[in-house]
Amino acid sequence: MTVLAQQLVLGLLIGSLYGLAAAGLSLVFGVLKVLNVAHGELIMLGGYGAFWAVALLGMDPFAALALVVPAALVLGAVLFLGLFGFVMRADEETRIKNSLLIGFGLALALHALAVQLWTADERSIPTPYGGAVITVAGLSLPVVRLLTLALAFALIGALHLLLAHWRWGQAIRAAAEDWQAALLTGIDVRRAYLLAFAMGTALAGAAGTLVTIGYSISPSIGLEWTLKALIVVVLAGLGSMLGTFTGGLALGVAEAVSAAAFGGPYREVVGLVIFVVVLLVRPRGLFGR
Amino acid sequence: MSGRGGRSETRWAAAILAGFAVLALVPLAAPRDDVLNFLLVILLSITLAESWNIVAGYAGQVNLGHAAFFGIGALVARTLWIDGTPIAAATAAGALLATLSALVIGVAAFRLRGAYFAIGTLALGEISRTTVGNVLAEISTLPTATISTYRLTHRYYVALGLAAVSVAVVAALARSRLGLGMEAVREDEEAAEASGVGALRLKLTALALSAALAGLAGGLFAYYHISYYPSHPFSPHWTFDAVLMTFIGGVGTLHGPVLGAVLYVVLKEYLAVRWVDFHLLIFGALFVAIVLVLPGGLVQAAARLRGAWRR
């Protein structure tokens, strides 16, 4: 029983990062109707950014967020202006399909680039408090992973507040709701799109940093994280960042349960099966609110 | 995208098949093994790219789980062959099972449209890879007796034959009513349905044909490689390679995927000497550029250049 409880706790801890990873994808898809399948590669880049900040600049791993997030914002803006912005003129169906193809090419290129820059080895960041564990009711809670959960939740909360109260946050939501109406009320829709894409990339950067601290990264984790994010978005739907976070926790728990029931290697399968089933049950309105 | 009847396709098919006839003479010159291996990889890539081209290029359905059909073909052919079935029968059985699973998967997956079909099939492909990797974790190696009689030339001719079949199938498809119907579905599914084209039936036919060729290619893979992990042919890289080769050459044309496959393998081999995976950086970037500015790939670029020349 304790073993299962322990697995569930670890599932919740990793699930918080699934939620954070999915939040960026959900924001971009919900607002721009752009399906960026290179989201996992952006997470991977964020992880290596943090790795560099620690290895080259000697920063504290968590403080690396202060460097990675702004850098990812800029990268997101560049990607929108240079690539994804060009598909915005097409109708919704073509836009989703073309953005998927662009993301696909981008993912391959970024993966190859990362192999050149950082080799194919797995890396993680050793933290000074690395091995520390808190024991509560017989369950061991790794301190570093608890901190990643807390930070993931804080970031999601901050995003929620920004979208709810900030002027541009409201503009982003208006553009997502009905871009024509938003345009008529004088909102600079293109800038709202740019901002949403940059924020989505910044969230990927933050997620990558936390993944590198709590777990490990390699150039090939991109596809896996893109799929995790897609699964969570499908589970949670669009429109609520707190819902997305809960979806991430649910996926983490589902994986833990399936690993306990069918053995570790099947951990990856359960999410994909949920994904396919939900897709088949709701083939069209799937990402709806 | 082409879509102007099948006459230019037939001419291209004749030219490509003539090229294959020349390639059939290569083993007679008794070249080094690495030359034959290199040509074999190109021929296998052509088959894989053309097989993906049928469902994505002609029927317009971006299938990102294509590796599953390649993997099923390889798995069945390898298992039966090692058990003593002749390789031809084993490969045929693998292709048959790949085709049947395409029909089953297709009925479900074609409820999804456009990008949703793409990510749904991507997930299905990953499910198959993980499951096979878990059930068959042991590496598969040929028995010593088979290795001692291994002839690379046999594999080479099988690869040549399969590439020729795939080109012939796509050429025949491009000329047929069936191919025309698929193109109608690709351009506008609602309009095609409204004018009496059974979209689901055509998409299923395209997926089944595509899976049959991919299954045959999987059989060649099982026949060619001495040892590999059973989950390896299920890896998404096979799908991604096919996508890159087809799009960069020219999706929905007969000769585009052939051109793309040759370029892709040549560049990959050339760069691999110094940089691992560097070809993916170039092809990934090229792919993005093609989606953004040149949806018809290199074939369209060539046609534009010719047009500008004549003017």
Image (cartoon, helix red, strand yellow):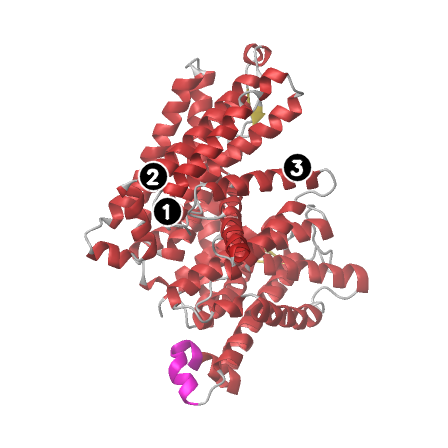
State which chain disc 1 sits on. B
Tell which of B296 and A21 is nearer to you: B296
State which chain disc 3 sits on. B
x and y, in percent, of residue B4 in the image: 36, 49
Q: Which residue lies under the disc numbered 3? A: B269
SS under mark 1: helix
What type is the residue that disc 1 sits on?
Tyr
Task: Look at the image and tell me whether residue B135 can be seen.
Answer: no
What type is the residue that disc 3 sits on?
Glu
Crowd class of label 3 (few under 14; some 14 to 19; many from 20; radius 10 Å): some
Q: Answer with left or right where residue B211 lies relative to residue A197.
A: left
Q: Residue at x 26, y 50 (%)?
A: B199
SS under mark 2: helix
Answer whether labels 2 and 1 touch (C-beta < 8 Å): yes
Q: Residue at x 54, y 71 (%)?
A: A197
Dominant SS of magenta comes to helix
Q: Which residue lies under the disc numbered 1? A: B58
x and y, in percent, of residue A96 in the image: 43, 63
x and y, in percent, of residue A37 in the image: 51, 57
The stretch in magenta equals A174-185
SS under mark 3: helix
| Disc assigned to residue A124 | none
x and y, in percent, of residue B281 in the image: 64, 51
* Mark-to-mark CA distance, 1 and 3: 30 Å
Q: Which residue lies under the disc numbered 2? A: B173
Q: Answer with left or right where residue B233 lies relative to residue B53.
A: right
